[in-house]
Structure formats: C-alpha cells, structure tokens
Amino acid sequence: MTKSPLRWKLSRRGLLIGVGTTVAVVAVGWVAGKDTLRRGISNAAEGTEKPVSRGAPSATPTQWLSFSADNILTVHVQKIEMGQGILTALAQIAAEEFSLPWENVRVVMDPTGSAVQDPNGTGNSESVVSHYTPLRTAAATLREMLIAAAASQLAVAVGTLTATPTGVRGADGKELTYGAIVAAHTGDWQTPETPPSLKPASAFTLIGTPKQRLDIPSKVNGTAQYGHDVRIPNMVWGVVARPRIIGATIASVDQRDAATYPGVVAVVVEGQFVGVAAETKAQAQTALLAMNITWTNPATLVTQAAIDSATTVDPSQGVQIQLDGDALGTLDQAKSVLYREFRTPMAAHAHLEPQASVVDVKENSVDAWVSTQVPVGMASAIAKALDRDIATVTVHPVYLGGGFGRRLDDGLGVEAARLSAAAKRPVAIAWSRADEFHNGYVRPPTHHVMRGSLTADGRIEALSHHQASGDVLLTIFPAAIGTFLGWDIGAVRGAKWYYTATAGRVMTAQRVALPVATSFWRGLGLLADGFAIESFIDELAEQATVDPLEFRLRHLPDTEFGTRMKNTLNAVAKLAQWDKPPAPGHAYGLACSADAGTCVAQIADVSLKDDQIIVHHVYAAVDCGQVINPDGVIAQTEGGIMMGVGSTLIEALTVVDGAYGASNFDAYPLIRNSRAPDISVVIVPSSAEPGGMGEPPIGPVAGAIANAVYRLTKVRPAQLPITIKQA
Amino acid sequence: MEFSYPAKRILGILLVTEREHIMELSINGTRVTIADNGDSRPLVLVLRDELNMTGTKFGCGAGICGACTVHVDGVATRSCQTPVNQLVGKQITTIEGLTLADGTSHPLQQAFIEHQVPQCGWCMSGQIMTAAALLNTNANPTRDDIVTAMDSNYCRCGTYHRIRNAVAHAASLKNGGTE
C-alpha cells in the first residue's frame, strides 16, 4: 500500500490538517460525502501529537490540498480524468483563494490508500458540484494558516500583512512566498478560529477564466497513460472466458493440457471463472481455446422481441413519482387528448479505449491499475475477491479513454487479481472490442406514453408521462431495494414535467424486468426522456398554434429554475436567430432540458438528403451556474451533443440469435466526422451555484433533431434512431 | 581462441536466432529488432505489447475506428490491419516520432492544444497521424478535404468539429501563417 506522505490530525472544526513526514509540506483535507460536518480541525505539529489512525472513519480525507516549500499548491483527488476536464477545473477552484499564478498549481489523481479515500467515484456530473465549496474552504483555511505562520515568522501582527499572488508582504515591504513560509515553519500550525471568508465571485481571477486543460499536452504526443497502456516489469497477459450468448454458463472445461501450452504461467478454473495467464496475449488465447469450454445456453434464448415486449408501458403498472392536481381525471374527461408513444433502444457505451486492468498480487499487498471511475469501489472488490484487507490494496488511477458510465463496474480488476494471485506475477487483461460489445451492460431501452390536453385558450391543461424502462441505478443495489421502491431513480432523470399545466401533471415510472444487463449510460434516462417530452411539447405547441419557443416560455414557472430555463431558451433563440427562417430546405428544431443543476437549450439546423438526416449545426445555450472553466463547459456541451447525435441518427444495439448483434463497429457504427454538425455554444451568465456538465447537454439533442425532422416531413419521429422511412 | 562446448552452443543459438528468428523494423528513424515468429501479428500489438510504445492506441482491431493509425512510408495506415512481416524495409512513423527534427512539436500537435481538441484523448494519436498524412500530401486542404480525410477516425467524445478547425489551423501554421 502506498504510504501517506503526511501525518494527519483531526480536530474540532471539521478539517484535517496534514504535515509532511519527510519533506516540508502542510495540507488541509476534508471528508466529503453524506456528512460534511464530520470535518474537524486539528493541529498537527510534527512529532508532538499522536497521528490519527487511517482506519478511523473521519480521519482519511476524501480530498486534500497542500503547499510545499517549492511554492507549489497541489490538489489531491480521486476524481478520474476521462476527458471532462475535471482535474483542471478542480485546480482552478483550489487556486482561486490564493490568487496564485496558474503555473504554481498542480492536481494529482491519487491512488487509493494514499490518505485519499473518495467513496463516490467519478460520475453523476457531480465532481465540480461536490467540490466547489469544500475545496475553496480548505484553500482559504490553508491560506489563513500560512498567513498566521508568516506573521509569527516575521514577528508582526497578521493585520500588518498584505497578500501577494505568491505569498505575503510585510509593512516593511519584505515578501515571503508561501513556499518559504512552509520551509521556515517550526512547531504547531495555527488553524483559524472562525471559518475563513471566501472570495466573492466578483473578485474571481481563475474561476470563470478559460484555462487550457492540464491533461491535453500529454494526449497529443502519446505519453498520456491509460489503463490499456500500463506495462510493468514481469507482467504477463491474461484472458478470461466470456459468454457470447446472453446468459450462457460454462458447462465443462477440459483443462488437462492448458498449463503445458507454451508461455502459460497460470490456469484458473473456479466455477464460472475460467482464465489463463501467459507470456503473450496470443499464447493465453491459444491455451484458453484449447480448453474446449462448452457453454450451456439459457433455456430460452433472449430475443429482441422479448425485450421490446417487456419494455412496454402497462397502464396498471408503475409508481407515480410526480403528481399534482388531477391530471389523469382531467385527461379522462378532456374532449381532445394528444396521445403519443416514443421508444428508445439499447445502446452501447463504445468508449474507444477498451477496458483494461493490470493487477499485481503480492504476498502482503496488491497494486492495481484499472480503467475505472470508482477506484475505492475497485479496491474493495479486489480485496473481497482475494479475501484481503482493503488497506493492503492500492488502486492507481489512470486516464480513461472514455467512461460514459461503463467504468462504474467493479468486476474488471477482480479478474486480473484472480489470475495474478495464481500466476504470482502481475497480470494484464485488455478487453477486445468484441468483449466490450458482448460482456458489458447497456443503456436500457425505454417506452414512453405521453398524454396531454389543452385549454380552450391554448394553455396546457393536463400532462401525463408514463415511462417504462430497464433498470439503471437499481442494478447496483440489493434486489430488495428495487422491489421496495418500485421505480428506478436513474431511469427517470429528466422524466418529470417542469412545464406547468392548469389542471395537473403526472409522471409514472415503471420498472421492467429485462433478460439483459442494463445500467449507467451518459445521462441515464436523460436522452430518452428529453426525446419524449420535448417532442410532445412541440406537438402541443403546434396544436395550440403557438411558436415552440413562445409555448415553452409560457409554460415555465416563475421560479428561479423557470427563470433560468427561460433565459437559456432565449439565449439559444438569439444565437440561432430563431426568428429568422433557416436556409432553404432546412428546418430548425428546439428542445431544452434540465439536469444536475444545469439548464440546456438547443436548436438543431437540419435538412434531408434522400433518406438521410443531415444535422448541419447545433446551437446550444447553457446555464450551469457559476462557470469554472468556460472552455470546459463548451467542450462538454459539444461532446454531449455529438454523442446525442449518434444516438438520434444511427445507434441501436439489438439482440440477434440470443447474443448482442454487434461484435465490432461494423455492426454498431458511431457517428463519423462527415455527419458531425458544427456546434455553437453560448454560456448564460448565472449567479447559481455550479451545476454539472458531464451529462446535461445530452438531454435536448434527440428532441431538437426530432422536432426539426417533423417540420421537414410532417411525420412525428416515434423512436430512436430516427429514420426517414419510419418517419 | 577456443570456445568451450556450452559457449559454442550458446553462440550458435544466438547466431541462428540472429539469422532466422529476428526481424528488423525501422520505427521513427530507429532500427528496432523484434522476434520473427513466422506469424503475421499486427503492428499495433508489436508496438504496444512488445516494444511498449503505447502512444499508438488499440480501438477495434478491425480497421474501423482509426485509433491505431501510424504512417508507413508517409501513408496513414491502420496498424491493427498491418502484419509486421510486410513492413521490413519500410519507414514506420508513430505519434512518438511526429516531433519535428528540431525538437519542436508538430504544427498539428500545437493546433490540437490551441483548439483544446482532446477530451478523453484515446483517439488522438490516430487523429493526428491521419491529419499529418493529409497535410503531407495536401498543404492547403479545403474543409471538404479535411472532412474526407478525417472521416476515417472515430471520436466517441465528439470533438469532430474541433478536429476540423485544428487541422485547418495546423495547415496554416505549416505554411507559416498565424491564423
């Protein structure tokens, strides 16, 4: 296990203070999670107090930041960089309270066990949201501690010191850098008695300022290290038997000869786990093939028809998770009810870096490099599989070649750990593209039944959204929780109505049991729900003969949220010149959605060429509250839009002959450059707290394109991907 | 000089190995020897698994995604579809070898940083190698030229329009422009 370079002390005001055990460094850490009040301040002068044991629940920080003698501020996190720019954003937040020159700031993805334990992993668009205030508070605390120490070193009162970008200046003009203060410090660090004041947003110089991403230089010269790239001495390659038919199990294995094959160093056959480790991948594959595994298929092969049939709204099923007024009664009585159904298919994550792990199981410790969004969960899973103490397992973070929710699965490192335990050497498992398509989990299919009515004066009277979806979040909880809840909080991201209705609104969530593994996919239910709701609202607007923008604006509430969404809609309308006609043969489609504290509105500029939908341009407006890195917000908006365009135009994973119908990109193509629209993004000024950006921008994409397609064809697209023949 | 029998035997094995079981490749201007197993294993696996040159990425293994793109004699080539035994005597260039002779970054690398193109970054070596091959043969590509060339490379993070802008910018940098 990686030893913490710091000795931590917990004390009364909720933060952890760390001091270097070998080099001059002072750190402030905190425990994030359910109870941030667990933070406590302590004072930890080297060698004078007993260090807090790492096992104590509140004594291991979730994140920390330090100042060292070389005047470098380092932020230590277990948030994983998968292209969302999180490391750079966190560095900006931390450095802001110091007004520090950007080149003096570092951010490090720490291994598990190195005084950082972030149980939350990276996902849910929440990294900036959850770090924003704690990181600033910790930074301000550290700043106050350094200033107090400087006053002591200069034998002056704190009030006589003024801050400089790199440290403090005394009344006599003498300057001390923060690094010099750390280096010269002896004795206890004094922690502030009262919470330090945080900079007002009007004084920000780093937060909200475009910064080049810290990870990008290594990504244009091939030096960035991903899970698939890890090479350590004495490493061998592992392969694992995986079923091709969904639900197939291993019936028999002929392992007599496998161990004698060239290069083979270990053969493991334990129940349904069959794997080989060998000097080369090819040798491992040859030996595994020689084992003549026979599979037992499920009694009934999974069919696409069975999945579609199960994913069907049943009016007698589901849980009403949003209910105000008498929506259903009103709809039953209404003279005219608009009724529409929408469907979205299963989809693959298709991150371009296949999953990979390298695990080195040693006698008393385990080191693992795993392409995972959840390092602590991975350490726990490996420890459990090997029956070891989690404190002896270190998961080293690596860059991820795309995550999109697929790398929240903690099984990956376990396979390599089992092979390494047998081989007594580090084992690498690198998934193939076929492994990815056949052995992952997928975005659940959905079915939406929408009903709505209008008042005589063209206002929305009643709205009903009944969604049937495979599970998303429930898949990681014990089955009893799903049974108790009856609905999946992940599947319904974006499913509730935020448009107002005079008589009432209802959203009904219906879990469907599927014979395939479904779970997290970027935005969870957001893309599907946005497609259904925004298509439906556009059609209601048409029935009311009101412009789609005006119709939305009229039906957003006069709340803070409603105001933000209206601002966002108006901003995108201005950006795309909604009030002017599109180019001849083109149509605009508008949609919006809210998620993770962020409002997004988009206008798609679309035309048709034969049977193909051409998305020329997508305009987007985003209100994500306080912006950290504007270019990061824009990049995430572009990325979410592009992934949404793929889902809207071409992506669907189907089951054929009991297996997923794709083993590679020939059968599951992604959007290529020639079908990728230009994108323009405007950030809406906002005084709200930071919202998430990883997922929200995917919400409106399908709805915006569908609404444009409808204007061109006068046929309402009813399913994704949209095809013109269907429409 | 007299060699003992074991020494002769070892020397003999080495000489035979030299003659019959080693293959020489030219990668980024350097001669590299790899085992010649008489098979046709793809270049991408030789680079990544045998030579630990992991800048070239594996994506699909089927020549579809373009993540493994390298240059063979200056031409953009899918290293997952290229058996090493076809590469003897040819010049292989990977992302690690793209740096210019004077040690500076390639204009494409500069442009990709300036436009903040990469997100996850896994496809970027392939994108840049594909673009570099384009600029080698077409110093002033139009937007259509760029789209046509770059259409061979997937980007799941969706950086496509930044790629288009960065390649156009790199072309201007290469031509001494400061667009």
Image (cartoon, coloured by chain):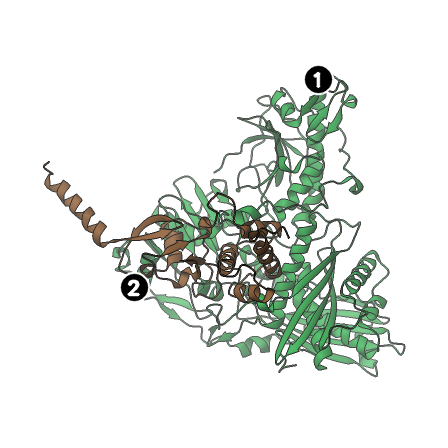
Chain colours: A green, B brown
Q: Nearer the viewer, residue A63 or A382?
A: A63
Chain holding disc 1: A
Query: Which percent across, then down, holds residue A249?
Result: 41, 67
Q: Quadrant of residue A188?
A: top right
Query: Which percent across, then down, holds residue A605?
Result: 70, 70
Q: Which mark is residue A220?
A: none
For disc 2, the marked residue is A290
Three-letter residue code for mark 2: Ala
Determine whether B45 is above or below A71 in the image.
below
Q: Residue at x 83, y 66 (%)?
A: A553
Q: Residues within 10 Å of mark 1 (few under 14, many from 20)?
A: some
Determine whether A507 is above or below A478 in the image.
below
Farthest residue, direction right: A457
Helix, strand or loop at disc 2?
helix
Query: Which percent across, then down, holds residue A390?
Result: 50, 43
CA distance for labels 1 and 2: 75 Å
Upstream in sequence: badge 1 or badge 2: 1
Q: Are marks 1 and 2 in contact (CB under 8 Å)?
A: no
For disc 1, the marked residue is A154
Instruction: Determine whether, in the image, residue A393 is placed left or right of residue B51.
Output: right
Farthest residue, direction top: A155
Three-letter residue code for mark 1: Leu
